[in-house]
Image (cartoon, rainbow, N blue to C red):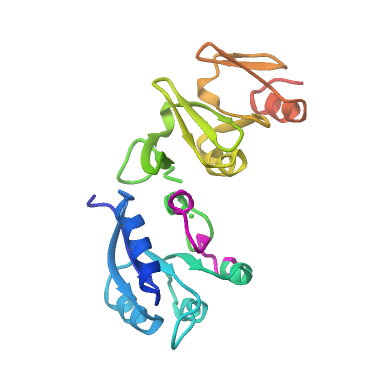
């Protein structure tokens, strides 16, 4: 893709670099340009080349990942990749897009990558593809059977929480992916998706009819949860 995000990896563990490189190669909107063994090399790369995203380890020789990040006046988007959870608060204070704990599963990597497409996550700007300049149709990539699958948001009817995954239902088919519904609620809220029940997130523009107890989408009747009723009725422009 000509409009892909240019990425660098800053990682001193060869195996970790290799895994991240493979994940980036499997993500169509990402393009790896440099792999740096330490933060000093990364500083040179960032100063000399255009970089959109840094996949940054914390425990690095010479200069730590967090100290590297603090030196950047105008940092690109950063996803931290670390074996240590205790630095997460510091990372988010520095407005990183996400914090990935090693070993990193591809499904978790995909979630973080989707946050890179958000128009705004913080002043530094984390997967959504709200109104991108290069696409008239917003989309996300979801991990389905170990593959990153592009799903256009205007095709989604609703999302249902299952036992250990969610089902993203479109007119054509349903896709199972290992998200929590709460994660998708945060991701999809800017695109006019509404949580109507602990198990259902719906596309507001796909609602064909509704009452105080249920909504109908494409012939499927979905319940409105008691705890969601007041908010849902307010969003749909009707008193509870």
Q: Nearer the viewer, residue 233 or 221?
A: 221
Q: Nearer the viewer, residue 100 or 184?
A: 100
Which residue is farthest bottom?
62
When asked about the image quadrant of residue 86, the answer is bottom right
Asked if 196 appears above or below 81 in the picture, the reply is: above
Where in the figure is residue 75, as x and y percent of width and height?
A: 43, 71
Q: Is residue 123 left or right of residue 3?
A: right
Quarter holding the C terminus is top right
**Residue drawn where x is 30% and y is 45% of the image:** 134
User: How many numbered discs sit on the rendered protein?
Assistant: 0
Where in the figure is residue 62, as x and y percent of width and height?
A: 44, 88
Q: Nearer the viewer, residue 230 or 90?
A: 90
Where in the figure is residue 208, as x and y percent of width and height?
A: 54, 14
When asked about the image quadrant of residue 149, the answer is top left
Where in the figure is residue 9, as x and y percent of width and height?
A: 36, 69
Whether residue 52 appears in this view of the structure is no
> Is residue 118 found inside the magenta-colored segment of the image?
no
Asked if 62 appears above or below 26 in the picture, the reply is: below
Whether residue 139 appears in this view of the structure is yes
Looking at the rendering, the stretch of residues picked out in magenta corresponds to 92-111
Q: Is residue 181 left or right of residue 105?
A: right
> Is residue 102 found inside the magenta-colored segment of the image?
yes
When asked about the image quadrant of residue 196, the answer is top right
Asked if 134 appears above or below 210 in the picture, the reply is: below
Q: Is residue 114 left or right of residue 239?
A: left
**Residue drawn where x is 37% and y is 43% of the image:** 148
Asked if 203 appears above or below 17 in the picture, the reply is: above
**Residue drawn where x is 47% and y is 59% of the image:** 104
**Residue drawn where x is 48% and y is 76% of the image:** 69
């Amino acid at each position: 893709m000509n409009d892909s995000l240019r990425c660098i990896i800053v990682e001193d563990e060869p195996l970790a670099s290799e895994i991240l490189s493979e994940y980036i190669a499997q993500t169509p909107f990402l393009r790896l340009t440099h792999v740096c063994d330490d933060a000093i090399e990364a500083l040179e790369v960032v100063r000399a080349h255009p970089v959109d995203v840094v996949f940054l380890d914390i425990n690095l020789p010479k200069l730590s990942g967090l100290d590297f990040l603090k030196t950047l006046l105008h940092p690109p988007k950063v996803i931290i990749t670390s074996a240590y959870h205790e630095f997460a608060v510091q990372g988010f204070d520095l407005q990183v897009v996400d914090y990935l704990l090693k070993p990193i599963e591809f499904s978790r990597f995909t979630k973080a990558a989707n946050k890179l497409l958000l128009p705004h996550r913080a002043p530094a700007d984390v997967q959504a593809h709200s109104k991108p300049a290069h696409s008239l149709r917003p989309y996300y990539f979801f991990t389905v059977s170990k593959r990153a699958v592009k799903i256009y948001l205007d095709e989604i009817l609703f999302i249902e929480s299952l036992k250990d995954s969610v089902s993203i239902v479109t007119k054509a088919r349903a896709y199972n992916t290992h998200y929590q519904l709460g994660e998708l609620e945060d991701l999809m809220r800017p695109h006019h998706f509404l949580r109507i029940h602990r198990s259902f997130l719906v596309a507001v523009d796909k609602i064909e009819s509704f009452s105080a107890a249920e909504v109908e989408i494409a012939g499927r009747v979905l319940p409105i949860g008691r705890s969601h009723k007041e908010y849902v009725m307010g969003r749909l422009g009707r008193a509870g």
